[in-house]
């Protein structure tokens, strides 16, 4: 299948985002990387169609999104994106940056619970 011209732009943006992670993304990635969470493998800034997911677990099709202050202005985009992902078999969990900074253990527990639920299907 031939890449669309916008595919290269999206790939390049994902690479940029990996190097421009927010403090909350760095903190969560430190706990998700290297199969630390229940043995589940996660990717960061993963491409799905035209979307870049903050974190993605391929074996469970789980997307984990962190919403900072910039997401306040893009609620409609996030909603449409979540609708598309859900319609295509993905599960999306959303957390705020504050959730990660103030209660990362609860965030990790919610992610692990969802991974286990989806793994059993």
Image (cartoon, helix red, strand yellow):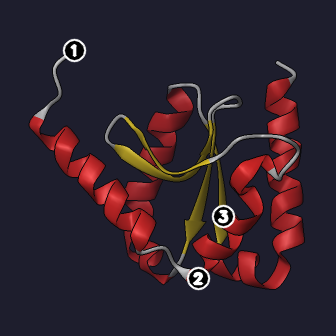
Name the N-terminal-most of marks 3 and 2: 2
Q: CA distance from mark 1 to mark 2?
A: 37 Å
Name the image quarter holding residue 31. Answer: bottom right
Q: Residue tagged by mark 1? A: 1
Q: CA distance from mark 1 to mark 3?
A: 32 Å
> Which residue is pictured at 68% across the width and 75% down the height?
27
Q: Nearer the viewer, residue 43 or 84?
A: 43
Instruction: Identify whether 53 is placed above or below 100.
Output: above
Q: Residue tagged by mark 2? A: 23
- How far from the left and from the top, in percent, is residue 82? 51, 45
- How far from the left and from the top, in percent, is residue 43? 58, 47
Q: Secondary structure at mark 1?
A: loop
Q: Residues within 10 Å of mark 2 (few under 14, many from 20)?
A: few
- How far from the left and from the top, in percent, is residue 52? 41, 50
> Which residue is pictured at 52% across the width and 28% down the height?
87
Q: CA distance from mark 3 to mark 2?
A: 10 Å
Name the N-terminal-most of marks 1 and 3: 1
Circles 1 and 2 in contact, beta carbons < 8 Å? no
Q: Residues within 10 Å of mark 3 (few under 14, many from 20)?
A: some
Q: Residue tagged by mark 3? A: 29
> Which residue is pictured at 17% across the width and 27% down the height?
3
């Amino acid at each position: 299948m031939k890449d669309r011209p916008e595919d290269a732009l999206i790939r390049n943006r994902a690479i940029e985002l990996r190097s421009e992670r927010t403090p909350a993304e760095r903190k969560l990635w430190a706990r998700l990387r290297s199969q630390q969470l229940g043995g589940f493998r996660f990717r960061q800034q993963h491409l799905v169609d035209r979307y870049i997911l903050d974190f993605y677990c391929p074996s469970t099709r789980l997307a984990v999104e962190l919403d900072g202050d910039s997401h306040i202005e893009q609620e409609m985009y996030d909603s449409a994106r979540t609708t598309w992902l859900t319609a295509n078999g993905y599960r999306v969990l959303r957390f705020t940056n504050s959730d990660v900074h103030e209660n990362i253990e609860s965030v990790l527990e919610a992610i692990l619970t969802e991974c286990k639920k989806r793994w059993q299907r």
